[in-house]
Amino acid sequence: MSLNGKDTKKLKTQPDKPPSVRVQLNALKLPTLKNILRFNHQNPFGNKAKLVVRILYLLKHGGYPRCPKCKYGRLKRRLHRRKDQSKFYCPGYPSGFREGDSFIHCNYTTETCEKESFVFDHSLNIIV
Ligand SMILES: [Zn+2]
């Protein structure tokens, strides 16, 4: 974020400008942030700082969609791609949240994947 004269001037002439999303998120409690992530079917684990960063990232870049085959896995981008592999794959999903629960494997792969846009529950009154 640049603090050149132009931006400062703009802020002064718009006193009703809402605080940044980061500021709004930091004002929320941890369980609320977790709910925002759950609402978007995203990973809700981590401390407050991590959750805020994750939400801001998803807001900007969107999240990967759920696997259309198993319905539970979330598509991932293949980082080290070989010639015969598709760009995105489903890593599968754990059958439960406890340690030792079995992992359900899925072999879905795709070349294209539309990211989902991140949304806030209207009741939170977050101004983006
Ligand atoms: Zn899958």
Image (cartoon, rainbow, N blue to C red):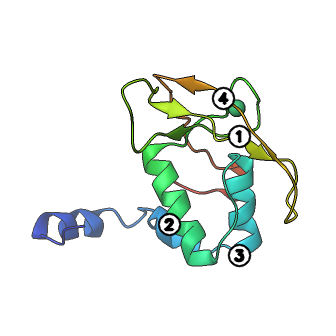
Q: Which residue is mark 3?
A: 29
Q: Which residue is mark 2?
A: 53
Q: Earlier in the sequence, mark 3 or mark 4?
A: 3
- Helix, strand or loop at disc 2? helix
User: Quadrant holding ligand 1?
Assistant: top right
- Helix, strand or loop at disc 3? loop
- Classify residue 2 as left or right of residue 67: left
Tell whether circle 1 marks a residue whose Cβ is less than 8 angstroms from ligand 1.
Answer: yes
Q: Position of residue 38 (x, y in %)?
A: 74, 53
Q: Which residue is mark 4?
A: 107
Residue drawn at point x = 76 percent, y = 37 percent: 72
Q: Looking at numbered disc 4 in the image, what kind of residue is underneath it?
A: Asn
Tell whether circle 4 marks a residue whose Cβ is less than 8 angstroms from ligand 1.
Answer: yes
Q: Note whether residue 128 is visible.
A: no
Q: Which residue is mark 1?
A: 92
Q: CA distance from mark 2 to mark 1?
A: 25 Å
Q: Nearer the viewer, mark 4 or mark 2?
A: 4
- Classify residue 44 as left or right of residue 96: left
Q: Earlier in the sequence, mark 2 or mark 3?
A: 3
Q: Earlier in the sequence, mark 1 or mark 3?
A: 3
Q: Note whether residue 36 is visible.
A: yes
Q: Looking at numbered disc 1 in the image, what kind of residue is underneath it?
A: Gly
Q: Position of residue 29 (x, y in %)?
A: 71, 75
Q: Nearer the viewer, mark 2 or mark 3?
A: 2
Tags 1 and 4 touching, CB below 8 Å: no
Tags 2 and 1 touching, CB below 8 Å: no
Name which quarter of the figure residue 87 lies in.
top left
